[in-house]
Amino acid sequence: MSAPLRPRPAAPHGAAVPPAAIPRFLTVGVVGSGRVGAVLGAALAAAGHRVVAATAGSGASRAREALLLPGVPRRSADAVARAATDLLLLAVPDDALAGVVAALAGSGALRPGQVVAHTSGAHGLAVLAPAAEAGARPLALHPAMTFTGTPDDLARLAGISYGVTAPAELRPLAARLVADLGGVPEWVGEADRPLYHAALAHGANHLVTLVNEAADRLRDAGVTQPEKVLAPLLRAALENALRLGDDALTGPVSRGDAGTVERHLARLAATAPESVAPYLALARRTADRAIAAGRLRPVDAESLLGVLAADRRQVAA
């Protein structure tokens, strides 16, 4: 870690602090040593910033802090906020964020000119309003990555995108922080934060569910190592989708093979009825996209759409 920085006198309450007042290497505190907070704290320290304090409530968080932030004192949220004279990083669950911000602002732990950044994808700057009223500078800084909370995550940070929402005067600092973390900023408007986060959750979280659903159905079919069967297929499908978009669509839905899809649904209904509804929803959306992309002619889709509509009615019943 870098050498200790000498404290600077606090600005008068409510006074604007110009960007030049923020040093190149920041004094940082982390509230929430979960999977994200501990890893980003470690990455900031590796970039030369001085992480001076962190919170860690659970046993898992304390273990992560000891592993990723060795020697960083464990303090209360208020104490961390007071120690983090330049940057306070809030890495707490989405639903807890507003309460944490309000409590810190209400206790007087925040200071004018201090940057208060959160890592939530779902929230923008509005949730930081109490901090801004206390004179702090609000910043939303969300890494578009899934975290394990281990040192392996540090290598995965290189080149990832960060969904950033920032006041205009704070954009240069936000870009610098993202660069220090090895990432690339994607500027997201305040009103677009829920849509941005929905897209990431839909893609990443639902992908995990989809993969495990496929693995379960392979086990039902007698396949003993479904991950071995799925790995090359899914890797190729993901790479093709990212490279080709809807032109990567293959399979019975994109071909309009109504009979095949009907047999899928019949067997799923008999073996794993809980999988019928998600299969139908994804098959219908796949058909819509295949038609729109010109991969499936509407005339060839009629029988398929009839099968999907009939089974949707049955599921609803």
Image (cartoon, rainbow, N blue to C red):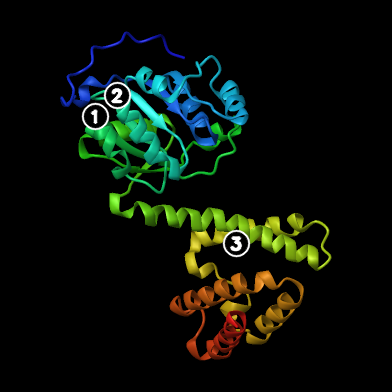
Name the residue that disc number 3 marks: 237
Residue 190 percent location from the top left of the image? 29, 49
Q: Say which of 148 and 231 sits in front.
A: 148
* Classed neighbour count for the residue bearing mark 1: other residues with Cα under 10 Å, few (<14), some (14–19), many (≥20): many
Name the residue that disc number 2 marks: 108
- Local SS, label 3: helix
Quarter of the image for residue 66 reads top right
180 in relation to 26, above or below: below
Is the C-beta separation of discs 1 and 2 under 8 Å? yes
Name the residue that disc number 1 marks: 134
Residue 75 percent location from the top left of the image? 47, 19
Q: Residue at x 65, y 81 (%)?
A: 261
Q: Nearer the viewer, mark 3 or mark 1?
A: 1
Q: Is residue 245 left or right of residue 315?
A: left
Q: Say which of 94 and 185 sits in front.
A: 94
- Local SS, label 1: loop
Q: Is residue 192 left or right of residue 285?
A: left
Q: Name the kind of residue labelled 2 in the image.
A: Gly
Q: Name the kind of residue labelled 1 in the image.
A: Ala
- Local SS, label 2: loop
Work out whether residue 49 can be spotted: no
Q: Say which of 316 and 163 sits in front.
A: 316
Is the C-beta separation of discs 3 and 1 under 8 Å? no
Q: Name the kind of residue labelled 3 in the image.
A: Ala
* Disc on the earlier residue, 3 or 2: 2
314 in relation to 155, above or below: below
Q: Residue at x 55, y 61 (%)?
A: 240
26 in relation to 94, above or below: above
Q: Nearer the viewer, mark 1 or mark 2?
A: 2
Residue 55: image tag: none
